[in-house]
Image: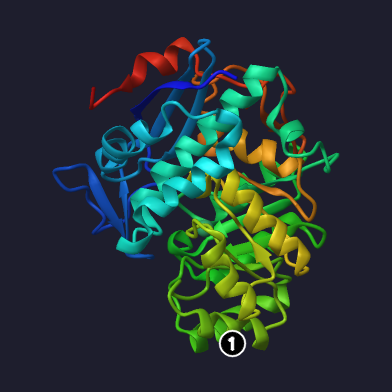
Amino acid sequence: MSRIAKVESYILTVPRDEPYLGALRTGEEPNRRGYFVRKGNKTVYPTVDRSVLVRVETEDGVVGWGETYGIVAPKATTAIVEDLLAEFVIGRDPFDASEIHDDLYNLMRVRGYGGGFYLDALGAVDIALWDASGRTVGKPIYELLGGRKQEKVPGYVSGLPKRTLEERAAFAKEWQDRGFDKFKFAAPVADEGIVREIEELREVLGSEASISCDMHWAHTPDSAIAAIKEMEPYGLWFAEAPIATEDVKGLGKVAHLVDTPIGAGEEWRTLYEARLRYDANAVHIVQPEMGHTGITEFVRISKVAHERGIQILPHATIGSGIFLAASLQASFALEGIIGHEYQHSIVERNHNLITKGIGCSDGLYFLSDTGGLGIEPTEEMISRLERQHA
Ligand code: MG
């Protein structure tokens, strides 16, 4: 057995020509720290792409990489990794990743740190340990998780970052011509309203395409029900995050009173949070986000979902490709996966950051079966990494 000898964390920053979700609207000017707030969802974003990476190394020199959110205040997460978690991981066997995950969770449980930046840090460490385990034995992570259960994982096109509705519909059509037939648009940047948006997309994409709406937690239960019912005549695949994440009972009400499946889960980090919604029959499609959950909790959230007849459609966010690779490794090993989000604006732009091995073409994801995550950071990525602590 080769134990973990080193744990380090880094901030990765990648400049963007245009912010995530497309051009800024009036009143969305960045502040001095480079943050701006989208008026449509009251959420803060940076003008650059940023994530936090964790690198572990075993006594034998095997390296594992993990990644989590670094969108805002990334130093909070790197400090948790280096100041707190690292010393509790050093000396452990990476094959005990799930046990290590639970031990680290327990360290802060009574203080109420069961989420947020603490769990993001834990998620990145967890992915790095799984990667190191896979590399140690030369097997992909899906093998360590019990083998491949999915032949195909379809990608759905997420976000249509164009200024006008006409341009967004034409852009979706371009992706359809490239072999994709599942789409999601974002309510905060549907300037003419979500009903006009789906009407136009349906018109352009035809009756066979799957079209969903990310409602960005913006509604009350009653207004969500009304909005979803207005979109239903145009054929809505699922309605994502219709109301505030805290209102579990309200989400249950929405799920009960509309015909469209409800998708949720990108902001959860643990099975505890997922279970609250499963128990309230509030979600038909769970969307776990690997960057928040790490592999250990991602698998737990997904397995319990599958047992309960809930479909699994993993989320994908701003990152280098490390946590996307982890998400695909887990997705191919799980039952009940119906697809995976495809953030074309991130994956295509960041292709120089990781070695080839994962991607999405003709509407289907593929992954590498080399050891661990199946990819690793390129020289270009390494040159962009900044370490804050030592
Ligand atoms: Mg979303």
Q: Name above or below for residue 182 compared with residue 342.
A: below
Q: Residue, x 65% and y 24% (percent of image)? A: 134
Q: Residue, x 57% and y 70% (percent of image)? A: 196
Q: Name above or below for residue 59 compared with residue 344.
A: above
Q: Position of residue 188 (x, y in %)?
A: 43, 63
At numbered mark 1, what does the secondary structure look like: helix, strand or loop? helix
Q: Is residue 240 visible?
A: yes
Q: For residue 312, what is the image quadrant?
A: bottom right
Q: How is the image coloured?
A: rainbow
Query: Which residue is situated farthest in the left direction here?
Result: 32
Q: Position of residue 318 (x, y in %)?
A: 46, 41
Q: Is residue 203 visible?
A: no
**Front position in the image: 120 or 379:** 120
Q: Position of residue 245 (x, y in %)?
A: 45, 71
Q: Position of residue 9 (x, y in %)?
A: 35, 28
Q: Residue, x 61% and y 26% (percent of image)? A: 133
Q: Residue, x 51% and y 68% (percent of image)? A: 215
Quarter of the image with the C terminus in it: top left
Q: Name above or below for residue 286 compared with residue 343.
A: below
Q: Is residue 385 left or right of residue 373?
A: left
Q: Is residue 159 left or right of residue 8?
A: right
Circle 1 residue: 253
How many tags in the picture?
Answer: 1
**Front position in the image: 173 or 248:** 248
Q: Residues within 10 Å of mark 1 (few under 14, many from 20)?
A: some
